[in-house]
């Protein structure tokens, strides 16, 4: 299995993601108010919290889909400082994006391509893989997410859960070092959530470094190494799941959990 | 599937039983009508009576006409001319003239003529029976049965005592009615004879011989003169050579169809199938003048008494008054619904009389060319509709039997055949004659008197259609009783779908037929259209080429324009804004002129097609910019983000992800633009690009047949558009394949 998904082989000591002093403004709105985070290779970090708390924005800042207003982001030794001059900067962003696969709430599959086409698109255009190589790899990945028989279907003919699994395969096909999940199950019908969560759990078992923004508390409890409660643009609490769910230290956490459970 | 056919008819759904009864009645009545019609039975639609011949009594108080029903009608003309002619004049409200019908002839009446004293009227029937009536008391004073075969034409001299006949075998015979003796026979010699003329004094006979005219001495049968067409440059022998040398062709190009001697026998006027009227000098044997202007064969020519004018009536339903000296037309009388067969000056000053195949006698005022009086030899439909109706009755009767069988076995085809049959009938066979009757210049009550059988049948067909369209009729076809509900629903859905298709096809056919009948009203010169069809059609290839090339150019420009509009780069953004503003702010035609006139001034001499493509492409590019911009912006932001998150550069994202999706969105509006472009491409005709409009305009102007040529052009634009719409549908289907669920 591990030939398909290559996980970080760094020593456990060096963090693969290092965020320092991250701020993000939308106009006058201060969405992220200076957060730091280190994620070790193979670690699964789940970010939960009330909506509007800046979770998604934080995740999108990691691969520069949102440009941070201040701070430094380092992914697998690629360092970008906010407000750096262009040039180098642009190349670094693409380097980070190649290392960080992302899965979106709305799947964002390319509707004009088949499932297979979606998966091989980036390896062929970005990495310069030949179509045969990419297809072989994509077929393995589609099988891994349990969709090998849907390879020639267009996204419109797939269920939400199937689409999200194709999206995961698409991200994995770029052989990322880390995976970012932006509320991957929020747009799904309840009975379809399971199949996506199951894939994510297997991915975690493979040792993939994952940062997951989700409302799926079961996933957080069962899979996460650390759970972060983010509220009002800052970390309200960081703790292992058992601790955070059973014995929260912060008042804000208790409030949130009381609200949800 | 267990067929229902083995069940007894009593188990049929009630509506189907009702339908079958209606169809059975239709079948029986239709077949009865058709059979008795073809056996010569009495029940037939009232049709008008083609009037073949016309004469005016010397005192101008009586008009005699001879018609297809073997009857001669005499009309008493009021002494006073009707002066209430004007825009609001309603010819249908006029008092009819007193009429007297003289019968006793057999076969269509080919010739009627008053004796010079006005006391006797002589008429010649199509089978050689000649009768004379005393005008004062309508007593028969003369009856001669001439030993001729069926006649094509017959003509009496001014004294109504000498008769020339043209038989169907092509032989011309001259008779003296006083002695009942045949004077001469001019044998058929293989010449193509259609028209016939006998001079007023009875001394000369003339007939066409193909494009030539042959004149004989009526007394001796000696050939006197052969009038042959020639070119004004005598070295050229064919009309085509003569035309291309821009010389005048004097004479006919097609067979001679009508002839008339002038009163003094100095001139012979001939009308031909080539639409021309030629005036021949009998002294020299040369053609003096040729007069064009009819749109179809000339069926009659007639000199005025003083010999200064000539009336010509044609198969274009028009009558023209020509000045003999020079052959120029002074008046055109339009209004007959069919071929004009005879014409005469009178009955009042500055009026003329015409008779036609539409069964009417019309009086026209010369000065303003209005019809001022109209008489029907018999009210009714045009004869062709009567024949078509009988054919329809036969066909629909037989098909109704087939429908009956299909319905009995509950087959869908039976239902569809019934649908087709009873939609086709009202639309084509009843709709067209109804349309024609409604345009007759008659009072509505009279129109209804003519049209009631059609209306009755129409109502009957509508009743059948109403029953046919009931759900309960459609549901059961071919669905076995024991079928499951879902199967039944599927079958009925399929039935409904098919029925929808048949209905819409029928509506299309109906509208096409209406369009056709409106076009028919324009009296189009079909032969002329046929001869120029291929020339104009060749333009459609150029139209398509210019439009296709322009749309490609426009798409490139529109894409660049859209990128410019969305760009944050000031130069690109403003440049694109300027382009759009300039092009959208000026008319396309003006732009085309500027391209056309401006490029040569810059020393750029382009093929007009290329210049046309530039003009159209640049213009449409500006309009399509918005389409592209909307298409690009309609691709969701998530798509761009997903691509970027995969590490794709912005160029890759645009090319691989955004553009293909935007393209699918813009295809339908671009298709519309292309259709609009194909029609706007007609504007480049001003650049002498030889596309459809240019060709239609050129031919139309040259021959004064703009209506004909532009209708051809319009048809081809339509055809191009329809073809493209089909292709567009296919393309959209292909592009939408990823959307299909």
Image (cartoon, coloured by chain):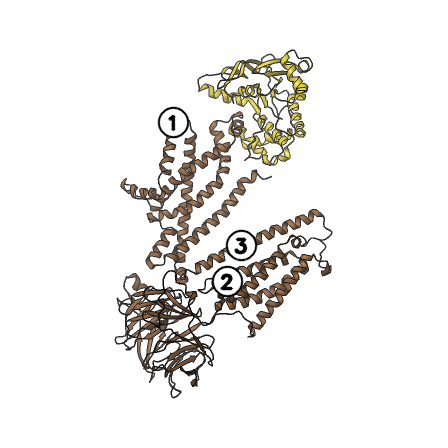
Chain colours: A yellow, B brown
Q: Earlier in the sequence, mark 3 or mark 1?
A: 3
Residue pictured at 51% horizontal, 68% vertical: B386
The residue that disc 2 covers is B434
Residue B414: x %, y % from top left: 63, 59
| Helix, strand or loop under label 2 | helix
Q: Residue at x 43, y 60 (%)?
A: B521
Is residue B497 shown above or below A31?
Answer: below
Visible in this render: residue B92? yes
Give neighbour class at mark 1: few <14, some 14-19, many 20+ (Cα, 10 Å): few
Q: Is residue B392 left or right of residue B358?
A: right
> Which one is nearer the viewer's eye here, B665 or B706?
B706
Going by the picture, which residue comes out furthest to the bottom?
B179
Residue B553 vs residue A91, the one in the foreground: B553
- Which label lies toward us, 2 or 1? 2
Q: Are marks 2 and 3 on the same chain?
A: yes
Q: Chain of mark 2?
A: B
Mark closer to the observer (3, 1): 3
CA distance separating discs 3 and 1 = 55 Å
If you read the primary sequence from the N terminus, does the residue marked by circle 2 or circle 1 appear first?
Answer: 2
Measured Cα–Cα span from mark 2 to mark 1? 67 Å
Q: Nearer the viewer, residue B613 or B101?
A: B101
Quarter of the image for residue B224 reads bottom left
Q: Position of residue B361 (x, y in %)?
A: 41, 70
Residue B418 in sight in this render? no
Q: Tell me which numbered mark, 2 or 3, is placed earlier along the sequence.
A: 2
> Where is residue B505 drawn, in percent x and y?
54, 54
Image height of B737 relative to B268, above or below: above
Q: Quadrant of the C terminus of chain B?
A: top right
Residue assigned mark 3? B507
């Amino acid at each position: 299995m591990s030939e398909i998904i290559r996980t970080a082989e760094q020593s456990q000591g060096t963090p693969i993601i290092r965020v320092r002093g991250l701020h993000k403004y939308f106009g006058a709105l201060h969405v992220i108010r200076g957060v730091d985070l280190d994620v070790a290779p193979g670690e699964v970090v789940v970010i939960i919290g009330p909506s509007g708390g800046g979770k998604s924005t934080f995740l999108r800042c990691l691969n520069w889909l949102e440009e941070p207003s201040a701070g430094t982001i380092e992914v697998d030794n690629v360092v970008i400082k906010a407000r750096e001059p262009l040039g180098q900067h642009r190349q670094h962003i693409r380097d980070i994006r190649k290392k960080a696969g992302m899965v979106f709430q709305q799947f964002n599959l390319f509707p004009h391509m088949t499932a297979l086409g979606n998966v091989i698109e980036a390896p062929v255009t970005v990495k310069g893989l030949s179509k045969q190589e990419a297809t072989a790899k994509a077929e393995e990945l589609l099988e891994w997410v349990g969709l090998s028989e849907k390879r020639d279907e267009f996204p419109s003919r797939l269920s939400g859960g199937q689409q999200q699994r194709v999206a995961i395969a698409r991200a994995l096909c770029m052989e990322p070092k880390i995976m970012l999940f932006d509320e991957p199950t929020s747009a799904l019908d309840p009975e379809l959530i399971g199949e996506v969560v199951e894939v994510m759990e297997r991915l975690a078992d493979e040792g993939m470094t994952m940062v997951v923004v989700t409302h799926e508390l079961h996933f957080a409890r069962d899979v996460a190494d650390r759970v972060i409660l983010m509220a009002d643009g800052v970390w309200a609490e960081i703790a292992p799941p058992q601790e955070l769910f059973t014995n929260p230290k912060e008042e804000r956490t208790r409030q949130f959990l009381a609200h949800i459970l | 599937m267990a067929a229902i056919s083995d069940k007894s008819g009593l188990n049929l759904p009630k509506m189907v039983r009702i339908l079958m009864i209606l169809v059975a009645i239709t079948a029986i009545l239709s077949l009865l009508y058709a059979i008795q019609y073809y056996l010569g039975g009495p029940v037939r639609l009232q049709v008008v009576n083609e009037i073949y011949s016309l004469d005016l009594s010397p005192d101008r108080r009586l008009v005699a006409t001879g018609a297809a029903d073997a009857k001669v009608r005499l009309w008493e003309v009021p002494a006073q001319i009707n002066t209430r002619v004007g825009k609001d004049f309603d010819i249908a409200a006029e008092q009819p003239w007193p009429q007297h019908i003289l019968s006793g002839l057999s076969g269509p009446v080919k010739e009627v003529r008053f004796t010079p004293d006005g006391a006797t009227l002589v008429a010649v029937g199509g089978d050689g029976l000649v009768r004379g009536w005393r005008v004062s008391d309508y007593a028969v004073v003369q009856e001669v049965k001439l030993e001729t075969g069926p006649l094509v034409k017959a003509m009496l001299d001014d004294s109504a005592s000498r008769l020339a006949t043209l038989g169907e075998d092509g032989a011309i015979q001259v008779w003296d009615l006083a002695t009942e003796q045949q004077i001469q026979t001019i044998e058929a010699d293989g010449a193509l004879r259609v028209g016939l003329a006998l001079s007023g004094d009875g001394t000369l006979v003339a007939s066409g011989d193909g494009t030539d005219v042959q004149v004989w001495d009526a007394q001796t049968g000696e050939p006197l003169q052969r009038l042959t067409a020639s070119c004004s440059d005598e070295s050229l022998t064919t009309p085509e050579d003569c035309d291309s040398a821009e010389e005048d062709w004097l004479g006919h190009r097609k067979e001679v169809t009508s002839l008339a001697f002038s009163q003094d026998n100095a001139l012979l006027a001939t009308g031909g199938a080539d639409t021309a009227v030629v005036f021949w000098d009998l002294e020299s044997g040369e053609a003096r003048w040729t007069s064009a202007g009819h749109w179809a064969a000339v069926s009659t020519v007639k000199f005025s008494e003083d010999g200064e004018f000539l009336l010509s009536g044609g198969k274009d339903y028009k009558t023209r008054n020509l000045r003999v000296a020079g052959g120029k037309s002074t008046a055109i009388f339009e209004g007959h619904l069919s071929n004009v067969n005879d014409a005469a000056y009178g009955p009042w000053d500055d009026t003329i009389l015409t008779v036609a195949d539409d069964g009417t006698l019309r009086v026209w005022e010369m000065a303003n060319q209005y019809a001022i009086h109209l008489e029907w030899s018999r009210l009714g439909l045009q004869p062709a509709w009567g024949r078509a109706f009988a054919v329809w009755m036969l066909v629909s009767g037989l098909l109704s039997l087939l429908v009956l069988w299909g319905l009995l076995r509950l087959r869908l085809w039976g239902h569809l055949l019934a649908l087709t049959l009873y939609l086709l009938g009202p639309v084509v066979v009843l709709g067209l004659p109804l349309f024609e009757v409604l345009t007759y210049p008659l009072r509505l009550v009279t129109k209804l008197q003519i049209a009631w059988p059609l209306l009755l049948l129409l109502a009957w067909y509508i009743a059948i259609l109403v029953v046919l369209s009931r759900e309960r009729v459609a549901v059961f076809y071919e669905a076995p009783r024991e079928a499951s509900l879902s199967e039944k629903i599927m079958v009925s859905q399929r039935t409904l779908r098919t029925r929808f298709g048949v209905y819409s096809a029928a509506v299309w056919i109906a509208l096409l037929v209406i369009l056709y009948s409106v076009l028919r009203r324009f009296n189009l010169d079909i032969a002329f259209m046929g001869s120029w069809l291929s020339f104009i059609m060749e333009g459609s290839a150029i139209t398509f080429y210019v439009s296709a090339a322009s749309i490609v150019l426009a798409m490139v420009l529109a894409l660049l324009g859209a990128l410019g509009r969305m760009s944050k780069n000031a130069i690109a953004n403003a440049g694109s804004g300027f382009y759009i503003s300039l092009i959208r702010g000026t008319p396309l035609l003006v732009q085309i002129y500027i391209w056309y006139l401006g490029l040569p001034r810059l020393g750029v001499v382009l093929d007009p097609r290329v210049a046309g493509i530039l003009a159209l492409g640049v213009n449409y590019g500006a309009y399509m910019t918005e389409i592209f911009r909307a298409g690009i912006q309609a691709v969701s932001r998530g798509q761009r983000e997903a691509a970027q998150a995969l590490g794709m550069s912005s160029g890759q994202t645009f090319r691989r992800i955004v553009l293909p999706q935007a393209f699918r969105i813009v295809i339908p509006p671009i298709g519309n633009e292309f259709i609009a472009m194909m029609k706007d491409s007609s504007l480049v005709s001003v650049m002498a690009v030889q596309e459809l409009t240019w060709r239609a305009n050129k031919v139309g102007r040259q021959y004064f047949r703009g209506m004909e040529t532009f209708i051809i052009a319009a048809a081809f634009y339509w055809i191009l558009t329809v073809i493209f719409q089909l292709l567009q549908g296919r393309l959209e289907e292909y592009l939408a394949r990823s959307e299909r669920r």
